[in-house]
Amino acid sequence: MRLSIIASLVAISATSTLAYVDRIVLFADSMSDNGNVYKHSGFPPSPPYWEGRFSDGPTWAEHVADSISIPFENIGYAGATTDNADAYSEYNGYVVPGLKQQIETIKSKGTSKSLYIIQTGYNDLNVINTPQFYNVVNQNYTTADIAANVVASTKAIIKKYKAKKFVFMSPPPFEQWPFIADADKPRVAKLIEGYNALVKSELKKNIHGVDLKFIDVHGWLNKQLAHPEKLGVSTINGPCIWGLGNTTAPLCDEPKDHFFFDSFHPNSVVHKALAESTLKDLKRWYKIHQ
């Protein structure tokens, strides 16, 4: 009896020490986009994509939003870079807002008590690797520029919302994505790993007086790619549909069997697993149930 009481008190104490947040505000790209780009551009074609997501089902962010009781604002736009002044994506004439532009132009109910999640860098690194996919303004774009943009946007969020809590999600190991040629994989892997270390270092060096936390999406996805069978999917069968927004290539019979839905994005099974992993971290750090 006494032990059970002590255990209960410990559990209550642990819960009471969790940081309170009134809502989550997510600034992100296609890994999180819940149809924002589709609403403005009609891209990606749906079907074969699921209701404007860049996958065959809900993104990880939507699963997280459905699992918590506080509001979740998804400001995720597929193709988003860190700043359109350096490079930007365009779908059917719609210019995708970069991280800087999302913060400046998209309304949010964020407050000083909100948690701000930033998932960015994937497209910027792709600009360096495969510039033909983007509208490139800065022809000498570097990882140092990307990191500086993330630091500047973090400062902008702090100034605009008096933000005190941040979570940064690292870009994926896209050197293993189907669109990267085998010969380029080592170089791209080095590019991504170098950037991930740099941006984390720059944030810690330049952002003070607020709480910074990091979720290693890069490492998590590497583990899943090493053993995709644990998720019930495969990588050797390629993507369910080749390319991006392709309506002429044949669609696979079972999208949920393929780790990748298209050549650039994981399928809905991977998204759900990423949501479960992310939730574990968020629940360790924050009180996200009212």
Image: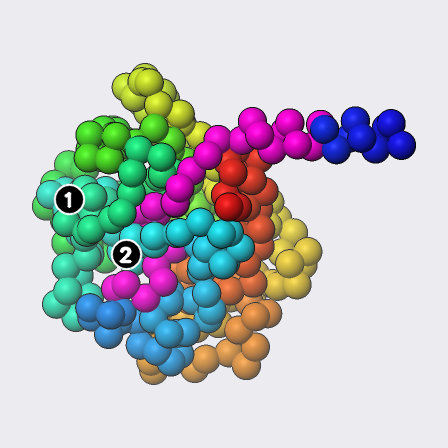
Label number found at residue 22: none
Residue identifier under label 2: 77
Q: Amino acid at mark 1?
A: Glu
Q: Amino acid at mark 2?
A: Tyr
Q: Residue at x 40, y 41 (%)?
A: 22
Give percent across and percent down for residue 143.
27, 33
Residue 34 visible in the snapshot: yes
Residue identifier under label 1: 104
In front: 148, or 39?
Answer: 39
Residue 126 visible in the snapshot: no
Q: Residue at x 45, y 45 (%)?
A: 173
Q: Is residue 266 above or below residue 243?
A: above
Give percent across and percent down for residue 269.
56, 63
In magenta, the rendered stretch is: 10-37
* Cα separation between marks 1 and 2: 14 Å
Q: Is residue 160 above or below residue 96?
A: above
In front: 7, or 265?
Answer: 7
Nearest to N terminus: mark 1 or mark 2: 2
Q: Residues within 10 Å of mark 2 (few under 14, many from 20)?
A: many
Query: Quadrant of the rendered structure where residue 79 is?
Result: bottom left
Residue 33 belongs to the span the image colors magenta: yes
Display colour scheme: rainbow
In front: 38, or 194?
Answer: 38
Q: Residue at x 39, y 45 (%)?
A: 24
Q: Is residue 118 above or below residue 254?
A: above
Q: Secondary structure at mark 1?
A: helix
Give percent across and percent down for residue 77.
28, 56
- Left of 285 or right of it: where is 73? left
